[in-house]
Image (cartoon, rainbow, N blue to C red):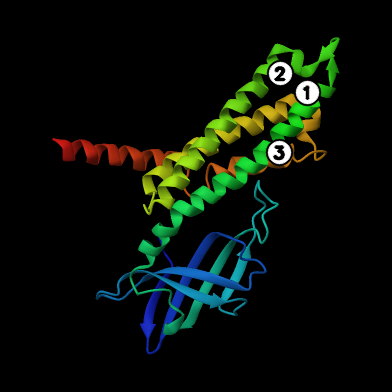
Amino acid sequence: MMITTCRKDGNDWVVKGKKCFATGAQGAGIGIIMARSEEEDSKSGACMFLVDLPDPAIRVTHVPNTIDNSQPGGHCEVSIDNLRIPADQMLGEAGEGFKYAQIRLAPARLSHCMRWLGGCIRAQEIAVDYANRRMAFGKTLIEHEGVGFMLAENVIDLEECELMIDWCAGVLDAGSLGTVESSMTKVAVSEALMRVADKCVQVLGGTGVTGKTIVETMFREIRAFRIYDGPTEVHKWSLARKLRRDWKAAQ
């Protein structure tokens, strides 16, 4: 659904359009712009450009107050008004931008999984410590089955996430693009970590919804992870399409 376009004009490319949720755009010193070429020959398709920021032709028009507001530079709405970019600032070949973007998707998905796994491990450590110190009805919280089971379920989810990440990393290390594997890993890990963060908040009770620990921050930010790099439903749709293709190929 790319609406930002670029057209060749002499030795330059002219780019115009809008970008929504351009993470980190506010205050950035460099950026990559992806635009759909208006050329009618082999150069048609997506193009990627490396640009210096700020630039008067690129304006941050709005920085929405998102649920994960600790992200540096925000998730900005950006307007690009006839930006002229020298042809030598194109990344790779004209019309090949989408392919380049696909190549980086799998490692990017995996880096998100690794980052959020680390955050949720820390949230679990805080919740376990709290449950072992907090007394309620004559014993520690963790001795109450309802609380202990939540923390035990978190351990299972965290271990499964680590195994999925290691498996996908192995696929990438072997030289594969890992498109399908990273898609599955992203879905499994993002959904599991959401459960972990939610249970950590629940164990901490009132403290869990305050800024007293990072658990509240993790819960807010992990919710957005299920949308970053493709919502869960889009990944499932893509995986279902592959199942359909594989079935047809086997007939």
Circle 1: element type: helix
Compared to residue 185, the image places residue 172 above or below, namely below
- Quadrant of the image occupied by residue 21: bottom right
Q: Position of residue 185 (x, y in %)?
A: 46, 40
**Which mark identifies residue 131?**
1
Residue 126 seen in render: yes
- Residue type of the residue flagged with mark 1: Ala
Is 158 displayed left or right of 211 in the figure?
A: left
How far apart are the alpha carbons under marks 2 and 1? 8 Å
Q: Earlier in the sequence, mark 2 or mark 1?
A: 1
Marks 2, 3: nearer the viewer = 3
- Quadrant of the image occupied by residue 31: bottom right
Using the image as rendered, state which of residue 177 and residue 207 is in the foreground.
177
The residue singled out by tag 2 in the image is: 147
Residue located at (56% from left, 78% from top) = 57
Circle 2: element type: helix
**Could you classify mark 3 by the number of other residues whose Cα lies within 10 Å: few (under 14), some (14-19), or many (20 or more)?**
some
**Which mark identifies residue 122?**
3
Q: Position of residue 42 (x, y in %)?
A: 25, 74
Name the outermost residue toward the left. Answer: 251
Q: Earlier in the sequence, mark 2 or mark 3?
A: 3
Using the image as rendered, state which of residue 57 and residue 157 is in the foreground.
157
Residue 219 seen in render: no
Circle 3: element type: helix
Give yes or no for contact between labels 2 and 3 (Cβ–Cβ under 8 Å): no
How far apart are the alpha carbons under marks 2 and 3? 18 Å
Using the image as rendered, state which of residue 20 and residue 136 is in the foreground.
136
- Residue type of the residue flagged with mark 3: Arg
Using the image as rendered, state which of residue 184 and residue 42 is in the foreground.
184
For the C terminus, the quadrant is top left
